């Protein structure tokens, strides 16, 4: 090959919910590999070596062989460019800090054109990784340069800017482990866990249970100390001051040494410790005043010891970390700035991003360090004598896990402090001589109680075991057994699915629930039409799931919606499939026959919960095949109660719905549970028994009593304007 070979990206679609590929959001891209269709990877000289040189970490991709190095084995044996782009795109996302693993590549009906689907946690990052992956593969094919490090750095910036922060992601991952669904409500860290009325919301370490009053108390350090002291929690003596002169007067009243810190400070910014002289106190006041944005400054009695942070969730202390004291040792040549770089900042645990448990220390840019050095008669540009130890930081970087070593009395004091302030999640800062000893045997104090505490130091400590704080927060919000879900019914097919959806929603509503409905006939709340447009789409569906008043939801899902957007929900209680039908509107998706249409419709069955039910039309053989795909139970419906499908299902002790003697029969095994006369229904419904049976079966799957189902059918109005609410 002497000429440049290109890979064209024809179209890119973000499937935001469960789809034909998988249960999770993916990006689907159509790639035209052109003449590369004639050049699998094993025919391109040097390609394997160049690809692995660019991305040696591809060795971790198992691919179809199912073993480490499996994908590279495929490359050696010969595979096509679209498949390679899929894996490279995934690996670029991984290297950028957005872990993912699912991907597939499938040939379309047009020669050289492939559909590539890959998991992504953020659409724009995924799109950028796709373009970068294509470019990298082209470079490896054509033997041209490619700067992998620069591209990964750019993607990492996008991940940092656009993805959930590590603390929020940790909580969301814990929810996912519990099978609790999540919806990101903003581009930031506001996330909904669960659906409808059973949802909870988090904003990193704040929840919808976090009291605004408690947050105000926590931000008022003087008030916090007064409340803690009144409840028997040890706190340092202190005063609030508004000038350097008043700070020195307070220090004399309290008795040196003292601590100065901003009234509105956090994360240890502007805090100076162990101050004795007037000049030190006045300099510390200036620093605290500046770091606190011009607010008042607190002067407190200095408590000797090490700073600790206890993370309280609910009524439990779930993690405790201690701080560190930092020194550098002179070599007689280097400045303190240089010594910090070579002796402190070389630690791989230090960095500027949230993923690093320890901070980078630049003395000349850190007011607290400058003040500490000035007290020793030094500056960041000073050159300490060889072997001279210089204190850089008295306390900070509270990121060394000691949870299992803490004395119960220390745990009890931290938990009490959080309760006194009123926070459901709190970071309680304590100064302790020894966290393993009883509180009353040492000089100790609670110095702050913080709302919205940082979690990363406990999730990924600099030393010690990471703590499952996300799991603790999820248990605090949902207990041990709730999953935040509401009953959801999804309906797919071509046989009056919009009308079936409206009927199911009405039956659920009269059972006593506030019901949301998104279908081709509009968007409804409790039978009231709030939008007359076609709402059988992802976005209107999300509107229902976000609505705190919705106790159950019904969705119509056409094949085009599944192919173009994905389902609006991750799992459902009931999935209805009326038929598998191919039509010309599916051609643009390269769905060309009934067999391919089956793979689209089965998506509705694939997402049924193990506790849920599939409602399937026994008259359609392809729909009947889907029964074995369902993780839950199955209800078949059909006109002929003696058909082989219904008879066998009844014989197995399962539920069926059919018509006999002009009555809809609900049968469970050999027993007829209820009879609903078609004559009692309005003519329009009575003349369409398949539609009614599908709705009846779905309502029955929701455990709505047959008497209510019958009443609901009699009161259902086909015209939405006449539907009562």
Image: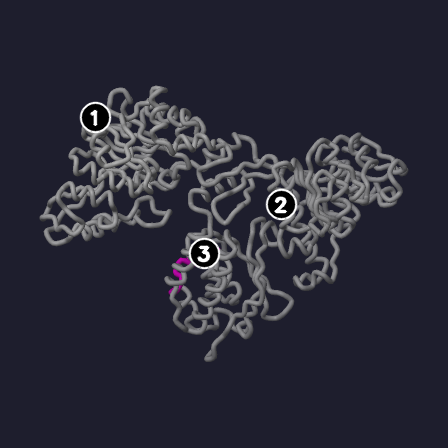
* 153 displayed left or right of 197: left
**Which disc number belongs to residue 508?**
none
**Residue 285 rendering spot, x and y as whole percentages:** 24, 38
Q: Is residue 186 visible?
A: yes
Q: Residue at x 39, y 32 (%)?
A: 218
**380 or 83: nearer the eye?**
380
Q: Residue at x 31, y 28 (%)?
A: 446
**Residue 318 rendering spot, x and y as whole percentages:** 40, 31
Q: Which residues are magenta?
A: 53-62
**299 or 27: nearer the eye?**
299
**Which disc number belongs to residue 543?**
2
Which of the two labelled residues, at mark 3 and mark 1, occupies the earlier sequence position?
3
**287 or 529: nearer the eye?**
287
Which of the two labelled residues, at mark 2 and mark 1, occupies the earlier sequence position?
1
Q: Is residue 654 visible?
A: no
Q: Secondary structure at mark 1?
A: helix
Q: Which residue is mark 3?
A: 93
| Quarter residue 449 falls in | top left
């Amino acid at each position: 090959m002497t000429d440049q070979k290109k890979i064209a990206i024809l179209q890119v679609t973000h499937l935001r919910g469960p789809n034909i590929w998988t249960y999770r959001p993916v990006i689907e891209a159509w790639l035209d590999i052109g003449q590369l269709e004639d050049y699998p990877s094993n025919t391109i000289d040097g390609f394997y070596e160049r690809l692995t040189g660019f991305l040696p970490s591809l060795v971790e991709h198992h691919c179809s062989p199912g073993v480490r190095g499996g994908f590279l084995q495929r490359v050696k044996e010969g595979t096509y460019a679209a498949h390679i782009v899929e894996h490279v795109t995934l690996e670029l996302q991984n290297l950028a800090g957005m872990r993912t693993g699912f991907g597939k590549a499938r040939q379309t009906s047009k020669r050289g054109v492939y559909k590539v689907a890959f998991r992504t946690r953020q659409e724009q990052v995924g799109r950028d990784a796709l373009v970068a992956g294509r470019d990298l593969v082209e470079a490896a094919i054509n033997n041209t340069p490619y700067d992998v490090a620069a591209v990964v750095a750019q993607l990492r910036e996008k991940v940092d800017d656009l993805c959930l922060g590590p603390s929020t992601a940790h909580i969301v991952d814990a929810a996912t482990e519990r099978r609790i669904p999540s919806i990101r409500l903003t581009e930031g860290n506001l996330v909904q866990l669960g659906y409808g009325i059973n949802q909870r919301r988090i904003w990193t370490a704040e929840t919808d249970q976090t009291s605004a009053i408690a947050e105000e108390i926590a931000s008022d350090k003087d008030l916090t100390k007064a409340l803690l002291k009144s409840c028997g929690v040890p706190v340092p003596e202190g005063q609030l001051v508004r000038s350097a002169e008043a700070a020195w007067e307070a220090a004399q009243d309290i008795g040196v040494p003292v601590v100065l810190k901003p009234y509105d400070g956090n994360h240890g910014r502007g805090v100076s410790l162990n101050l004795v002289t007037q000049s030190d106190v006045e300099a510390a006041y200036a620093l605290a005043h500046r770091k606190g944005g011009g607010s008042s400054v607190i002067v407190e009695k200095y408590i000797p010891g090490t700073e600790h942070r206890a993370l309280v969730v609910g009524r439990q202390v779930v993690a405790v970390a201690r701080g560190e004291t930092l020194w550098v040792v002179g070599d007689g040549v280097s400045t303190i700035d240089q010594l910090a770089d070579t002796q402190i900042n070389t630690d791989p645990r230090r960095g500027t991003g949230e993923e690093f448990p320890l901070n980078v220390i630049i003395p000349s840019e850190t007011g607290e360090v400058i003040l500490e050095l000035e007290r020793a008669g030094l500056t960041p540009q000073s050159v300490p004598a060889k072997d001279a130890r210089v204190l850089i930081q008295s306390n900070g970087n509270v990121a060394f896990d000691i949870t299992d070593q803490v004395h119960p009395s220390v745990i009890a004091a931290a938990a009490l402090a959080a309760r006194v302030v009123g926070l459901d999640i709190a970071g309680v800062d304590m100064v302790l001589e020894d966290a393993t000893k009883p509180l009353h045997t040492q000089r100790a104090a609670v110095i702050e109680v913080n709302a919205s505490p940082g979690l990363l130091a406990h999730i990924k400590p600099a030393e010690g075991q990471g703590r499952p704080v996300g799991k603790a927060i999820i248990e605090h919000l949902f207990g041990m057994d709730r999953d935040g879900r509401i009953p959801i019914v999804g309906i797919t097919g071509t046989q009056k699915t919009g009308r079936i959806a409206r009927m199911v929603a009405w039956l659920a509503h009269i059972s006593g629930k506030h019901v949301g409905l998104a279908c081709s006939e509009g968007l409804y709340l409790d039978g009231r039409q709030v939008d007359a447009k076609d709402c059988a789409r992802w976005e209107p569906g999300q509107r229902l799931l976000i609505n705190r008043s919705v106790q159950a939801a019904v969705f119509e899902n056409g094949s085009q919606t599944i192919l173009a957007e994905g389902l609006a929900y991750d799992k459902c209680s009931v999935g209805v499939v009326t038929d598998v039908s191919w039509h010309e509107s599916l051609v643009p998706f390269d769905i060309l026959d009934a067999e391919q249409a089956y793979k689209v419709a089965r998506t509705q069955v694939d997402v049924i919960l193990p506790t849920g039910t599939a409602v399937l039309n026994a008259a359609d053989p392809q729909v009947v095949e889907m029964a074995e795909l369902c993780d839950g139970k199955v209800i078949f419906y059909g006109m002929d109660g003696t058909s082989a499908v219904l008879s066998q299902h009844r014989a197995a002790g399962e539920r069926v719905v059919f018509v006999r003697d002009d009555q809809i029969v609900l049968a469970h095994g050999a027993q007829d549970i209820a009879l609903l006369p078609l004559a009692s229904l309005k003519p329009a419904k009575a003349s369409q028994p398949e539609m009614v049976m599908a709705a009846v079966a779905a309502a029955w799957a929701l455990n709505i009593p047959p008497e209510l189902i019958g009443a609901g059918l009699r009161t259902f109005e086909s015209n939405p304007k006449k539907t009562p609410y």
